[in-house]
Image: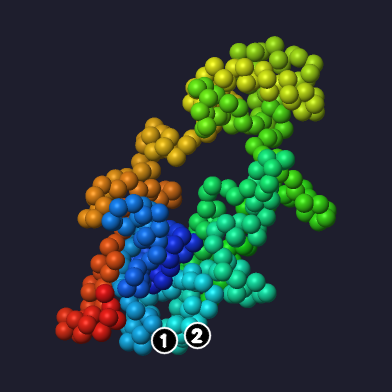
Amino acid sequence: MAALTGMRVLDMTQYEAGTSCTQFLAWLGADVVKIESPAGDPGRQAFKRGQADSQYFLNYNANKRSLVLDLSKPAGRNILFRLAPHFNVFVENFGPGVIEKLEIGYEALRAVNQSIIYARIKGFGSAGPHSEYKVFDPLAQAAAGIFSVTGEAAGPPTQPGATIADSGTGSQMALAITAAYVQQQREGVGQLIDMSMQEASLTFMKTRPVTEWGSGRAALRRGSAGGAPTGMYPCAPGGPNDYVYIHVATTRMWDSLCVGIDKPHLADDERFASGRSRMENAKWLRAEIEDWTMGRTKFEVMHDLAAKGVPASAVYDTNDVFTDLHLKARGFFQTIEHPEAGEVLLMTSPLRLPKSEVALVRPPLLGEHTREVLSRELGLTDAELQALREQCVIG
């Protein structure tokens, strides 16, 4: 039995921050019913190629069911209120004021389900001077200080390529919901969970700027450089991602690096005798290491140094990860058959719970489970469902 078997989730999320949250819950065995408008989650169209749902949508919505419900209509809201008592959790990440306009806030759902867990993800949370501001991932990262420590020292603040704020907030919300569910099962209580993307993103900033906290000084950008010789080094054949990152944290690692790059004499070189002297002579040390890395591919460097006990990783590009033998051996990517998109390669759960295995189920088509959910949960007949379709309440 999966870990979260029994948890039932009404998923009214879109794009990524909310959908990544409910994706984690579904991966752990929760029954997640995705409530979509007749137009569908806008993520279905994001970065779209061809006629099928986008790869973006597919990667965040596996193991869910889709129910189309027009909540702008009283009859649509009535169905939601009738469904709420059958579920443990409601999750939403709409912009400020949207839920309030639809009149489906926490108190409204609590009136029909006293123990419901109502989870909200907002850019700046649901209270505070900035709570009405609209936010997307880059804005939350900027507001959390992440841009300010990203990029080269002499360059401008830089946006990281990964959507840290969206998926980072989603994974933290999944943890909060799971904790609230445990309390709900133990004590019979529900609660409102209010999560700010700014605050969730700040939890990833506890290491980089910590030495500056309370000093009145802002942490500096330093690119990919660390204490010499830690840093990024170019490799053959010199392409835009032909780099390796080497991290030397101890004297033993330094000695191993010297042996690993076939220059054991560097360990006895006075210019590099200590951490301080290696920093002072970083230019010459870097030249010695680059002389070796430039004659090898990034993966040759990675494997050669790792074998010597030196932490090093090739800079994988977005194609390398799909061909990586290690990820393949662990089964991290799986191919599924989609009725519209054909064969689709999806990431699987990074959560490895041997006693809670959940098979990957393809993401749902828009409204694919409307009839199934409403007939099973509310006992609606085919005639009643057809009448609701003709009124454009369901799809």
Decide: is 296 above or below 348. above
* Quadrant in which the C terminus is drawn: bottom left
* Quadrant in which the N terminus is drawn: bottom left
- Furthest residue in direction left, as rendered: 383
Q: Give how far apart the Cα atoms at labels 1 and 2 are.
A: 9 Å
Decide: is 95 above or below 311. below
Kindly identify the residue that appears in the image at 25 percent across and 84 percent down.
391
Decide: is 92 above or below 311. below
Decide: is 161 above or below 214. above
Camera-nearest residue between 30 and 142: 142
Kindly identify the residue that appears in the image at 35 percent across and 48 percent down.
346
Answer with the quarter of the image where residue 287 lies: top right
Percent of width and height locating residue 214: 81, 56
Kindly identify the residue that appears in the image at 66 percent across and 30 percent down.
230
Residue located beneath label 2 in the image: 107
Residue located beneath label 1 in the image: 112
- Furthest residue in direction right, as rendered: 215
Q: Is residue 351 left or right of residue 270?
A: left
The answer to whether any part of residue 73 appears in the image is yes
Q: Secondary structure at mark 1?
A: loop
Going from N to C along the chain, the mark reached first, 1 or 2, is 2
Answer with the quarter of the image where residue 54 lies: bottom left
Q: Amino acid at mark 2?
A: Glu
Answer with the quarter of the image where residue 84 lies: bottom left
Percent of width and height locating residue 44: 36, 61
Kindly identify the residue that appears in the image at 43 percent across and 66 percent down.
14
Percent of width and height locating residue 150: 65, 46
Camera-nearest residue between 127 and 81: 127
The answer to whether any part of residue 186 appears in the image is no
Q: Amino acid at mark 1?
A: Val
| Few, some or many residues within 10 Å of mark 2 (<14, 14–19, 20+) | few
